[in-house]
Image (cartoon, rainbow, N blue to C red):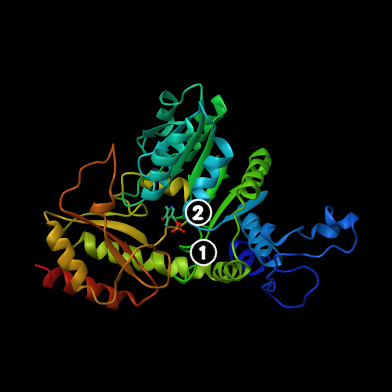
Amino acid sequence: MKRDTQLTRAGRPHHGTRSVNAPVNRASTILAGTARELYNRPDGTPLYGRFGTDSQNALRSAMCELQAADYCALAPSGLSAMTLTAIAEVSSGGHLLASDSLYGPTRMFLTDTVARWGVEVDFYDPRAGAGIADRIKDNTQLIFCESPGSLTFEVQDIPAISQAAAKTGACVMADDTWSAGLNANMLDLGADYAAQSLTKYVGGHSDVIMGAVLARGEAANRLKEAEWRMGFFVSPDDAFLVLRGLRTLDLRMEKSARNSLEIAQRLADHPAVSTVIHPARKDHPDHALYERDFTAPAGVFGVEFAGWSLARGERFLDALDIFGLGFSWGGFESLAVHCDPQLRRHFRTAHDGALIRLAIGLENVEDLWRDLEQAINTSA
Ligand SMILES: *Cc1c(COP(=O)(O)O)cnc(C)c1O
């Protein structure tokens, strides 16, 4: 089946109910028929609500089907999806390599929490590619990747990094939020874990926070164990919302991406702009990797305004009318943020002026462009 057909069918209930959607099944206690069944339920019925009912399992199974994974752990947020992979893989005396382009809070979890567990954390250049081999040590247990990176959108060579890791037995985790697991498959590219914030495109409606981690084979077993031991749980109501979002993921991403490429081109042609940072554009430094590993882009990208002060950047944001000012992306509405206060990098290439991140939504592209143009002009 092709991807769009799959999106309409994955995770549908197979038995019990004739409704198209799995019911929202709220449960803590799930009763056993007999004493023997307390610890060993027939036909895979969960023992206890924390493991998830039909609602969470429908979402898990849909995610697994889309990425040909053996297990999908559901985490209470995208951030906790990232942290779960570290919990599954690292131990005292180990070493973790982290891309310098990681989402800020993931980075802080590694430097402030994982480092306290007696695990050495080192950052590497997101563009290291096969050169990562020089940074891998005997005790390297896990390599954190994020492709493209938050705010600066470097595309990582996941196959090259995974090959180098496989030689030493280290595992690779790829934060896959930008592709939503739809426009790239990090597991096919060689990563052991593909993790994403479902809050973004899959949820898609700015009303739910959740994360997912997918894995195959032995890694899937370790992932499942880590999820259970941590007691991670997402509510059946939220799982229902995220699965509802998944049904229209391709349509929404397609329009958001199409809008974003049009806006990116008009910005690139505008005299106020020095650089547009969008992996799907030919002028992006990692465009060849994007072309090789992704089938389509997301609608989130960066734009540098030449010589703009922080104050001018703030005036520009304040002048926007249709674009909201707020964190997250992948919802139906367009958003803008100023990146500088969030940037924490060792290997960052210097940029000139203000770096703004635009998340392009489903509005009409002409309305969006008029909004950006008037904000550039009135902020002068
Ligand atoms: C938003 C985001 C996260 C965190 O997701 P939440 O659901 O907000 O916790 C992690 N990684 C990336 C790349 C993100 O954009």
Residue at image coords 37%, 54%: 280
Query: x%, y% of residue 363?
Result: 36, 76
Q: Say what secondary structure mark 1 lies in.
A: loop
Classed neighbour count for the residue bearing mark 2: other residues with Cα under 10 Å, few (<14), some (14–19), many (≥20): many
Question: Looking at the picture, does residue 256 appear above or below residue 75?
Answer: below
Name the residue type under label 2: Gln
* Viewer-closest of 295 and 167: 167
Classed neighbour count for the residue bearing mark 1: other residues with Cα under 10 Å, few (<14), some (14–19), many (≥20): many
* Distance in Å between CA atoms under marks 1 and 2: 9 Å
Question: Looking at the picture, does residue 134 appear above or below residue 90?
Answer: above
Q: Quadrant of residue 217?
A: top right
Q: How many marks?
A: 2
Residue position for label 1: 202
Would residue 176 appear left or right of 329 to someone viewing this image?
A: right
Pointers 1 and 2 in contact (C-beta within 8 Å): yes
Quick check: can you spot residue 1?
A: no
* Viewer-closest of 187 and 205: 205
Quadrant assignment for the N terminus: bottom right
Query: x%, y% of residue 258?
Result: 39, 66
Residue position for label 2: 196
| Label 2 CB sits under 8 Å from any ligand 1 atom | yes
Q: Say what secondary structure mark 2 lies in.
A: strand
Query: x%, y% of residue 27?
Result: 70, 68
Quick check: can you spot residue 3?
A: yes
Name the residue type under label 1: Val
